[in-house]
Image: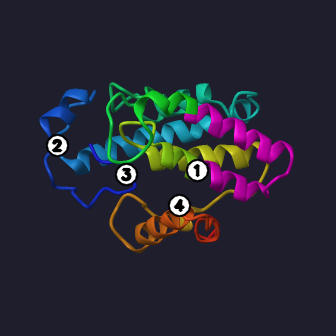
Amino acid sequence: MTDDLFATDENNTALSPEEQLDLIPSLSTRAELNEAERANIHAARVWAMRPHTLKRVDLLTDTFARELHKRMFNQTWRWAGRYRKTEKNLGWEVARITEGMRNAFDDAKTWVGFSIYPLYEAAIRLHHRLVVIHPWPNGNGRHARLIADVMIAALQGEELTWGSRENLIAIGDARRRYIEATRQTDVGNFEPLLAFARS
């Protein structure tokens, strides 16, 4: 399975037998999978942005991250909400994922609690850490963006637009700019991603 951040435009490509084994609905193409995931993620976003959810004290924890991922993909993938169990060419070693996630959220709480970074930069830095750890078999970028959105909404910041809410899964200018900005964060330059997320 490819991560959504680096996937190519394969809408008409048949899903592999391995992917189909992990699916809950019966789907055969990448386009069908994208649509199923989109509907599932929309429902999770509605839940995450409810005032009751945003008041939870565990928003910046690995427990909430797992719950959110499960809600994002629980109608699509059998492994929703579970950290990956296989090594990939991206991300941390499997044995370190839980530690990395806990540290990322502890750092984010410190950034916010002590005003180390402005809110939007703290959210973008958390997004970057989650993408680097790459904890899920799939959906890492989408999950990291929604976590950043939840963090900002809970602290009553202005909503991020992520390139004016364009489709970041489909090949296009918005996706290209997002990937380029995300790669800049790898060398410590958060400004392009911060600008993209607020454009």
| Of 129 and 35, the residue lying toward us | 129
Q: CA distance from mark 2 to mark 3?
A: 15 Å
Counting residues from the start of the chain, the first of labels 1 and 3 encountered is 3
- Side (left or right) of 58 relative to 84: right
Counting residues from the start of the chain, the first of labels 1 and 2 encountered is 2
Look at discs 3 and 4 and give the one toward the viewer: 4
* Residue placed under numbered mark 3 in the picture: 4
Tag 3, which secondary structure?
loop
Name the outermost residue toward the right. Answer: 114
Disc 1: CA contacts within 10 A as few (<14), some (14-19) or many (>=20): many
Tag 1, which secondary structure?
helix
Magenta-drawn segment: 100-126
* Residue placed under numbered mark 1 in the picture: 127
Q: Which mark is residue 151?
A: none
- Residue name at image x 54 percent, y 32 percent: 68
Q: Is residue 48 above or below residue 157?
A: above
Q: Amino acid at mark 4?
A: Asp
Quadrant for the N terminus in the image:
top left
Look at discs 1 and 3 and give the one toward the viewer: 1
Residue 101 magenta-highlighted: yes
* Residue placed under numbered mark 4 in the picture: 186
Disc 4: CA contacts within 10 A as few (<14), some (14-19) or many (>=20): few
The answer to whether residue 155 of the structure is visible from this angle is: no
Q: Tags 4 and 1 in contact by the CB under 8 Å rule?
A: no
Q: Which mark is residue 15?
A: 2
Counting residues from the start of the chain, the first of labels 2 and 3 encountered is 3
Q: CA distance from mark 4 to mark 2?
A: 31 Å
| Of 72 and 181, the residue lying toward us | 181
Residue 161, position as x, y percentages in the image: 60, 62
Residue 104, position as x, y percentages in the image: 63, 40
Residue 82, position as x, y percentages in the image: 43, 26
Q: Amino acid at mark 3?
A: Asp
